[in-house]
Every structure is written in structure tokens, then in C-alpha cells.
Amino acid sequence: MGNNPASGPPGVMVPLANRPRRDNGWTLAWVIVYLGTVAAGVATFLNRNVNFASQISPDYLNDPAHCPSGAASGRRSLLGMRAMDDDGDPLSLDEFMSVALYWLVGSVVGALLVGMLFVALVSRNPKLLVGVAISLQIALPLAAGTGALFAGSLGGGIPLLLLAGAVALLFWMWREQLSLVCELLGVSGTGLRENLGLVGATIAVHAGLMVLCAPLLMATLSAVTNGHVAPNPSAAASPGPGQCTDAEGNEVMCCEWSVDGHVAPVMTLAMATLLWTSFIASQVRTFTVAATIAQWYFAPVVDPMKGPGARSGSRVGSALGAALGPAFGSLCFGALILTAVSMLRSALEELKKKASDNIFFYCLFVLVQYLFTIVEMVTKFATVRCAITGEAFWAATRGVATLLERAFLDSFGVWWFPPMILQMCGLVLSALWSAVVYFAAAASWSGLSNGRGYAGIVAAVSFVLSWLVLSFFAALLLDIVDTVFVCFAMDRDAAAVSRADVHAVYNRLPSVKPIVIEQPGGGYAIGQAPQQQYASV
């Protein structure tokens, strides 16, 4: 076909070098909002109450002399605390740190090893992961229902047993799709194993996000210090010095911390900017993964880019450079859409709580949530297409919407399984690792009075760390699954077979139809599957 060996079929993978900048206005918009938020944070820092730390202490707030009734303010209350008895903590922080430091360091190392094991299982034995996930989905309600029956709770046990049976029936009906999911995950694991530079690039993106978020978090924290001590409106009486009670006679703080009027807008702006910036980092990760995997996918076998680990650093570096360069405006735009969806979803959740008995609103809530899910899915696939073609965001959205309509929407069941399987297996591996840590630490500290308590803390930390690491790898693997699918669909539209091994898997998707060829006039025609143009790996 005379393809560019680095870019696959003509017109599909546009080389990352020398791409034009797209959607620059959205880059400028984010920069303005970010700098404006930081400036607002600086202003709140300069306007802070320097006595904030001492004035929010329980002793200070419990003295009515510090908030005379004439100083009452209608400003928003942020800290109004009840009097609390401190019974003390039987665990000693100093003792815990002295005995658990090496265990905590080992937990970090162990979490990374668990993550490597996870990737190895996905790429080499995905059937085991699928089997574990399915078994848990059936075993958990089965065990709970059996336990409820033995405890004499017939009404609680039978529904759980019926649920276990229904789940088992569902998985049996989807057994062919589950077999396909095993191969999809295997393709994803192979893609990550041959592009391990993605791990370092993604960690770098998250590190950059932390740097960018630090001023925004400081803006939020400094805004809280803009205020003064005011009378607690719930304090109805003061029976004695340093004592206040509410209308029901319960002891409450006499004073509260009341923030200034500008605090709420500043905090809202800071949180919105923080959310937008976080989504930008997520978009950069998705773009970097997509551009890297697309280079790997469309490179012919004879090219050294397609070997295991070959030129992985070069692929990842060029992909990350394109994400932070020509495509950054498009990523800012996509992230803004995701930010709006997230904020609207949170607002809907609050409305749902207030109107929980309204069946009409509940149906509307389900419909809107479905639409939000569609928007998020299309946004993600549009980002993948941006990475492959270098298009602006709206152009990529239109292109990917047409592509998904032809090749994806009937396969929703298949695409629901991979996240569920990866999450369940991540949960199991994290639980197993934390259990090993707990029993080992408890045996090591058997001579300490608080040994089991310290072991529980270390196990909890190990669980959280391993879960975060596995979630990190799961996100990468899912991004690769989505990217390879878009590459496959674009391959088919171009009547090409860039990777025969991938086509052998993805052609089994229930939504895959005969090849659709775009005509010069813009229409589409049905074509025959071509002979393999690239050797399989």
C-alpha cells in the first residue's frame, strides 16, 4: 500500500512532529483562570486573620467574652464546634513511628510489586483475572445470603441468594463476551508491556498536577483564615463562665468562626479551577497513552518501533510533547466539558437527596446520568482521535461520534466488563496484600501491648497504597483498550490491517460490521475485508 512505516495507512495516523496548534483559545482561557485563582489566593493570604490558629481553639471559642453579642455577624459560619470530651488515644504516635517506619516503606515497595504482578497477570493470564472477578461477584451475595439463612433471617437471605443466581445466570449468558474480554485485556497488557515508558510519563503528569494544584489548595486554605470570631447562634444560654448550651440544654461552643463575604466565591473559584486542572492532567494522560499506542499499533512489523520495548521512550516522549504542545488547547477544552459534567452531576446528586420521593425527578435523574455518561465517553474517544489524527477537538468529536455509531454502540456489554474485572481484581490483590502485611506485622510486634493496633494501621496503609497503584495501572490498561479499539475501527474504515493479531480479537466484537469505506464525495460504501498487509507479531 505504500504506507508510511511510522504512520500506518495513509490519512489515519498523522505524525506527531510539526502538527499545527489547535484550540489555542482554550489554553489561554485556562491560563487566565488559573492565574486569576492564584491571584485571589494571594489576596486572601494577605488579608488573613493572623490570629486564626489561636482563635479556633476550643478553649478560645468556649469563652463568651471573645464574642460579645453586639459583635454578631450575618456572615457565613465555617467552624461552629460542639464541646467534646477527649478521652485520649491509647495508641502512641511516637511508638508507632519508631516501630513501623520500615514497615511503611516496605508497604510502598510492596504496592509497586503488586502493581507489576497485576500487569503481568493481565498480559499473560487474563483468564485468571476474569475468573476471580466473576467468582467474587457470585460468591459475595451467595455467602451473605447463606449466612443470613443460618442466622434465621429468611427475608434477608432469600433475596441475596436470588441475586447470586441472577448474577451467575447473567455471566453464563455473556460467556462468549467474557471470553472476548480476556483477549481484550491481553491485548491491553501487551500494549503496556511493550510501552513501559507510559508508566514513567503518567507518573510525571501526576507529579506536575500536584505542583499545579498546590497554589490552588493554598488559596482555598488561606481563604478560610479570612474572618473573625462571632457568637454561636445555636448558643441559647450561658449558665456559667466558659459554658454555653443550646435550646435543648446540650453544651455547645459559645463562639464560632465566621468567614468574610468574599470567602465563598474565592473557594468556589479555587475548587472549580482545581477540578478543571485535574481533568486537564487526565486528558494529557489519555492523549499520551493514545498517541503512544497508536504509534505502536500502526508501525509495521518490519519497523523497529513494533518490537517489544523498541523505541518505547521515543514514542512516549513524542506523545507527551504533543500533548503539552500542539494539542494542549484541545485537551483544555475536553477537560472543561468534563468539569462541567462533574459539577452538574454533583448538583443533581444534591437535588436527588432533596427530592428522593419524587418518582418523576428520579426518572429524569437516571436519564440525565445516562446522557452525562455518553458525553464523558465521547469526550474520551475524541481525545484518543485527537492523539491519532491531530484534529481540533470538535472535528475529532464529530469524527469519533460517527465512528462509534458504526462500530461501538452495540458492544456496550463487552466494554462494561473490563473496568469491573480490573477493579474487582485490584480489590482482591489489595486485600490479600494487606492481610499478609497485617499478620506479618502482628507476629513481629507480638510483644507490644498495642501491636495488633499498629499492625492494623500498617495493613490499612498497605491496602490504600496498593489500591492506588492498581487503580493507576487499571486506568492505563483501560486507556489502551479504548485506544486500540479506535485504531482498529479507523484501520477498518481505511480498509487496512495494521495488526492482524488485534484484528483477530476485535473482529469478534458483536458490533463489528463489514468494512465501511468513505467515498470521495463524503458517503460510505461497504467493502470486503482486505488481505493482511502487515505480518502479525
Image (cartoon, grey):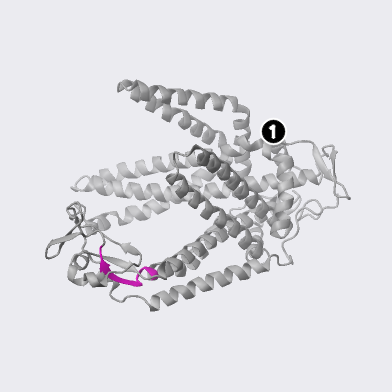
Depth check: 23 or 124 in front? Answer: 23
In this rendering, the answer to whether 380 lies above or below 16 is above
Q: Is the residue marked by circle 1 packed among few (<14), some (14-19), or many (20+) residues within 10 Å?
A: some
Kind of element beneath mark 1: loop
Residue 59 among those drawn in magenta:
no
**At 25% from the left edge and 63% from the top edge, which residue is drawn?**
232
Q: Is residue 341 visible?
A: yes
Q: What stretch is highlighted in magenta?
A: 223-232
Q: Which amino acid, mark 1?
A: Pro
94 left or right of 365 in image: left
Residue that sits furthest to the right in the current view: 521
Indicate the quadrant where residue 428 lies: top left
Q: Total label count?
A: 1
Image quadrant where one finds the C terminus: top right
Depth check: 348 or 29 in front? Answer: 348
Residue where numbered disc 1 is placed: 510
505 left or right of 65 in image: right
**Spot occupied by residue 233 in the image (x, y as percentages of width and height):** 26, 61
Indicate the quadrant where residue 436 lies: top left
